[in-house]
Image (cartoon, rainbow, N blue to C red):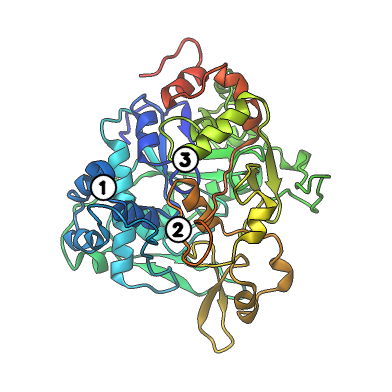
Amino acid sequence: MSPTMALPPIIQGGMGVAISGWALARAVAVHGQMGVVSGTGLDTVFVRRLQDGDVGGHLRRAMEHFPIPQAVDEALGFFRPDGRDEGEPYALLPMYGHLVDSARHRLTALANFVEVRLAKQGASGPVGINLLTKIQTPTLASLYGAILAGVDFVLMGAGIPREIPGALDRLARHESSSLSLDMPGSENEQLIFDPRDLSGGRSIDESDRPRFLPIVASNSLAMVLARKANGRVDGFVIEGPTAGGHNAPPRGPKTLNDRGEPVYGDRDLVDLERIADLGLPFWVAGGAGHPGRIEEVRAHGGEGIQVGTLFAFCQESGLAETHRRAVLDQAGSGAVEVLTEDRASPTGFPFKAVQLHGTLSDEGVYRGRDRICDLGYLRTPYRKPEGGIGFRCPAEPEDTFLKKGGAAEDLPGRKCLCNALMATTGLAQVREGRPGNEPAYLTGGDDLRVLGSFLAGRTSYTAADVIQYLLPENESAV
């Protein structure tokens, strides 16, 4: 982002797996606001799009500009000009672990480069990328690819991304970088990424270091990151528990309401005046998709708002059309329902789920799905009895999880977000010998309940409609 470019009042949230794809981010950024691509599972999204024929040729056009030709040659091995045969499963990438080969990192970097480059085409506003702190193993390669494409902002939540600012400094200089592996009982294990291993010694010009915006839910975490991160923090997104996707757990003892949802209280409120005292820009997220909210945040010293839910169901989002239509129909009639599921996510964080028949929010669909773990993004590391590092997930087959030393009480209610969120964007894996494909799982913030009033009788809308709805009356979209 140019030092002279004004900070935008609207950040489009980085949602799900490919819901915030390049098309949505670009549609927002061409109107001068911050478009954000989701980096979650982007390597798998990328190779599945290639296997589906790269409709429009967008991926291959962007790949031509990647400065490591070997990565492009390797990725084109997944390209199917005519797409997959009917009923043919997608070819899988090897799951990330503590150590992976350079080819695996190259593909991840390329996927993130392509997504950011496509989002930036013709954009007058900045483009960011959103990553989950909880998903550690692909993070450095993902950041590097985004940096090579000129990403303007990096946003990260679902954890404490204290080491990311320093990693961005080093990656922009094409230097080796590392992150501490979040593994109970170990403080010394590192994830190491060296850009020189990807390029084979090929010289690449130094890149601009993107600005870093951690997504936080408390004053204490904002202060810790502002003062104790290993590099420059450039601002914050302050996210409340009404936001879609993963929410921070309530502070203090857990209490559930009669729907089984975690109860949030006064301790979970963020004091915006104290955030403003840190002297850094901030945006407010969670229930922010309403006219007048930008002015309210500005009155507290902030820049504006981050909005996800309204953008998630617009025409340019990556949501599969059948799911978009179903939710908009429900919203139009006032029948849409969102539940904060306490146990669904393998991360242990509460997760907002749209209650939609035929998806994983449907208890019958959940119980009818065989547990399988073949993407593995939400697996967590553990120390094996013999001393090595393994990975496990409470949404994987129960016997497998228990054999890896997982606790039985962690198993009930867990859902495979990796496969379900791929299905939500229309990239469901085909399961041979089982009925149908992987079921989807939709998320949305509490604002989804009032989406009908925004629709005002419409059956569809665009990202530009959202921007114009949210901007103050004296401001207009570019």
Q: Nearer the viewer, residue 324 or 353?
A: 324
Real-space Cα separation, disc 1 to disc 3, in angstroms? 18 Å
User: From where the camera sits, is residue 288 visible?
Assistant: no
Instruction: Kindly identify which residue carries mark 1.
Output: 59
Which tag is nearer the camera, tag 2 or tag 1? 2
Mark closer to the chain start, 2 or 3: 3
Helix or strand or loop: what does disc 1 sit on? helix
Q: Examine the rendered structure and indicate whether residue 397 appears above or below residue 55.
A: below
Mark closer to the chain start, 2 or 1: 1
At x 51% / y 51%, what residue is drawn?
Answer: 421
Instruction: Kindly identify which residue carries mark 2.
Output: 429
- Residue at the limit of the structure toward the right, as seen here: 258
Q: Quadrant of the N terminus?
A: top left
User: From where the camera sits, is residue 469 visible?
Assistant: yes
Q: Assess whether mark 3 and mark 1 are in contact (beta carbons under 8 angstroms).
A: no
Real-space Cα separation, disc 2 to disc 3, in angstroms? 16 Å
At x 32% / y 73%, what residue is drawn?
Answer: 101
Instruction: Kindly identify which residue carries mark 3.
Output: 319
Helix or strand or loop: what does disc 3 sit on? loop
Q: Nearer the viewer, residue 69 or 368?
A: 368
Three-letter code, disc 1: Leu
Q: Examine the rendered structure and indicate whether residue 224 appears above or below residue 289.
A: below
